[in-house]
Image (tube, helix red, strand yellow):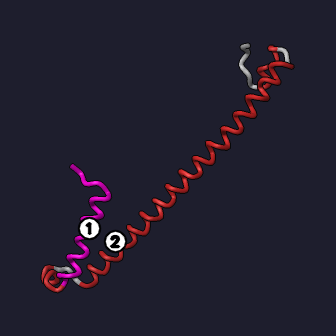
Amino acid sequence: MALSYADRMDEITVMVDGCTVHQERLSKRGLTQELLARFIEQHGKVRRVNSEQEALKARLKEKSAELEAECAILFKIAAEIRKIIKLEMPQESWKEFGIQAKR
């Protein structure tokens, strides 16, 4: 089974820590200071971008709630106007207002 993003990031965080502690020993197998620095830097970038994404998701939820509230007001006003139109205008003209002809 594939690991989730959170599980992979946890795994990589532990790997970064382990590589940092044991870099000298791992250097014999090719873990250079430069490679470790790139790994650490990329890990940091991914964490920053993820944080930005989470903040954007929160803003999206806020905007969605705001939109819902504004739509509720709009729909209430439209219902009131629809009643006025139905009372005043002949049924044949309701289509002009976007109202389906039914009483």
The image quadrant of residue 17 is bottom left
Q: Position of residue 83 (x, y in %)?
A: 78, 23
Q: Amino acid at mark 2?
A: His
In screen coordinates, is 79 left or right of 36?
right
Q: For residue 43, which numbered disc appears in the image?
A: 2
- Marks 2 and 1, Cα distance to the nearest angstrom? 8 Å
- Report the residue marked by disc 1: 12
Mark 2 vs 1: CB contact within 8 A = yes
The span shown in magenta is 1-23
Residue under the point 22% across and 83% down: 32
Residue furthest out toward the right = 88
Q: Position of residue 22 (x, y in %)?
A: 17, 81
Q: Position of residue 73 (x, y in %)?
A: 70, 39
Q: Position of residue 26 (x, y in %)?
A: 15, 80
Q: Amino acid at mark 1?
A: Ile
Q: Is residue 21 above or below residue 72?
A: below
Looking at the figure, which quarter contains the C terminus? Answer: top right
Q: Is residue 24 above or below residue 3?
A: below
Q: Is residue 81 above or below residue 65?
A: above
